[in-house]
Image (cartoon, helix red, strand yellow):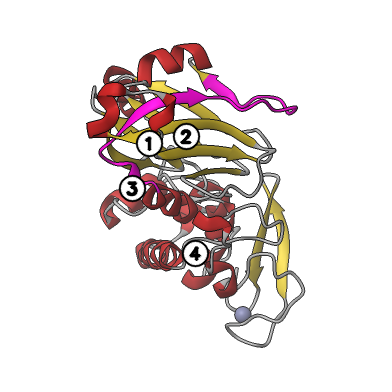
């Protein structure tokens, strides 16, 4: 958490920054350990002040602010980060403030003409902020660290990236080098919707089973984007204006251990641990 739908919601909330010019970059004083930044704040200021925002993209679970020189600022929220333009949950965990001004006033760029901001907030400080040149981005994309996006990949590619893996399906869905964007929460929901037991081995699943997983992945991620993501009981994830997302009300299995399955109404949801992460499923709907 946050996963693809939450990061996509953050990305969309940054659209008003497109066309604006960066006039300042500040790291608010914090008594918590600073988030990992590459380069350091002074160099970041030097590199991005006076640049304009031309697009805001998403790369797996990262928000990418694209600048007019082809470089990008990448925010990776990891466990408890937020990228937003206003109303952070509190000031305590505000980690970076990028001041923006309308481009026509940017010639006289100074802190006094800041009309808007991009904020990075992180309750646990585990996220990262990076500034990459176009070449660095190209190198990263070619490195294979990140597979195709879960919402952009076609079925044949999706199937080919999983079908030969001799590991259980649930932890494999979290492997960002195969397909990017699926995290722990949505993996349980996707497998429940597909009727697949999370411990089934990838290479023992039929092509029609993979087709169901592929289709559930699309359906669930798109539904979750529509609801602007899931805010769990810890309340960390907020969309803009400090409001919670809405998709947590549609979860069928995640964090519902020992509650009756909402799909069959006959079995209790089971929690197991796979690769140190919780998995939730229904033994009736998702047979071994
Ligand atoms: Zn069930």
First in sequence: mark 4 or mark 3? 3
Task: Count residues near mark 3 (Cα–Cα under 10 Å), then give few for <14, some for 14-19, many for 20+.
Answer: some
First in sequence: mark 1 or mark 2? 1
Front disc: 1 or 3 = 3
Q: Nearer the viewer, residue 17 or 65?
A: 17
Q: What residue sits right under mark 1 in the picture?
A: 64
Considering the image in quadrants, where does the C terminus appear?
bottom right
Q: What residue sits right under mark 4 in the picture?
A: 190
- Tell me where the magenta segment starts and ends, as one range: 14-37
Residue at the image position 26 percent from the left and 54 percent from the top: 154
Assign a secondary structure to mark 2. Answer: strand
Tell me which corner region of the image, top left, top right, bottom left or bottom right, holds residue 52: top left
Task: Count residues near mark 4 (Cα–Cα under 10 Å), then give few for <14, some for 14-19, many for 20+.
Answer: many
Residue at the image position 72 percent from the left and 68 percent from the top: 270
Residue 195 can be seen, yes or no? no
Q: Nearer the viewer, residue 29 or 107?
A: 107
Front disc: 2 or 3 = 3
For the residues bearing labels 1 and 2, Cβ distance under 8 angstroms: yes
Residue at the image position 61 percent from the left and 82 percent from the top: 262
Front disc: 1 or 4 = 1
First in sequence: mark 2 or mark 3? 3
Name the spot of residue 56 as percent of width and height, x first.
Answer: 32, 41
Q: What residue sits right under mark 3 in the picture?
A: 16
């Amino acid at each position: 958490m946050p996963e693809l739908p939450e990061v996509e919601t953050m990305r969309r909330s940054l659209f008003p920054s497109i066309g604006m010019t960066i006039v300042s970059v500040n790291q608010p004083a914090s008594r918590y350990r600073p988030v990992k930044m590459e380069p350091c704040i002074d160099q970041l200021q030097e590199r991005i002040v006076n640049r304009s925002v031309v697009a805001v993209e998403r790369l797996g679970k990262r928000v990418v602010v694209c600048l007019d020189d082809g470089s990008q600022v990448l925010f990776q929220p990891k466990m408890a980060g937020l990228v937003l333009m206003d109303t952070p949950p509190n000031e305590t965990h505000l980690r970076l403030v990028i001041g923006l001004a309308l481009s026509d006033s940017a010639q006289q760029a100074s802190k006094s003409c800041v009309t808007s901001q991009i904020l990075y907030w992180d309750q646990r400080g585990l996220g990262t902020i990076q500034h990459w040149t176009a070449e660095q981005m190209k190198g990263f994309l070619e490195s294979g660290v990140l597979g195709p996006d879960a919402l952009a990949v076609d079925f044949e590619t999706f199937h080919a990236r999983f079908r030969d893996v001799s590991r259980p399906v649930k932890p494999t869905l979290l492997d960002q080098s195969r397909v990017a964007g699926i995290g722990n929460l949505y993996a349980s929901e996707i497998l429940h919707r597909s009727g697949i037991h999370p411990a089934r081995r990838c290479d023992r699943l039929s092509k029609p089973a993979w087709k169901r997983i592929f289709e559930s992945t699309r359906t669930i991620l798109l539904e979750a984007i529509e609801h602007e993501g899931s805010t769990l009981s810890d309340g960390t994830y907020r969309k803009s204006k400090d409001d919670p997302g809405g998709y947590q009300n549609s979860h069928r299995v995640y964090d519902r251990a020992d509650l009756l399955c909402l799909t069959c109404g006959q079995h209790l949801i089971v929690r197991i641990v796979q690769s140190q992460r919780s998995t939730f499923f229904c033994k009736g709907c998702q047979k071994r």
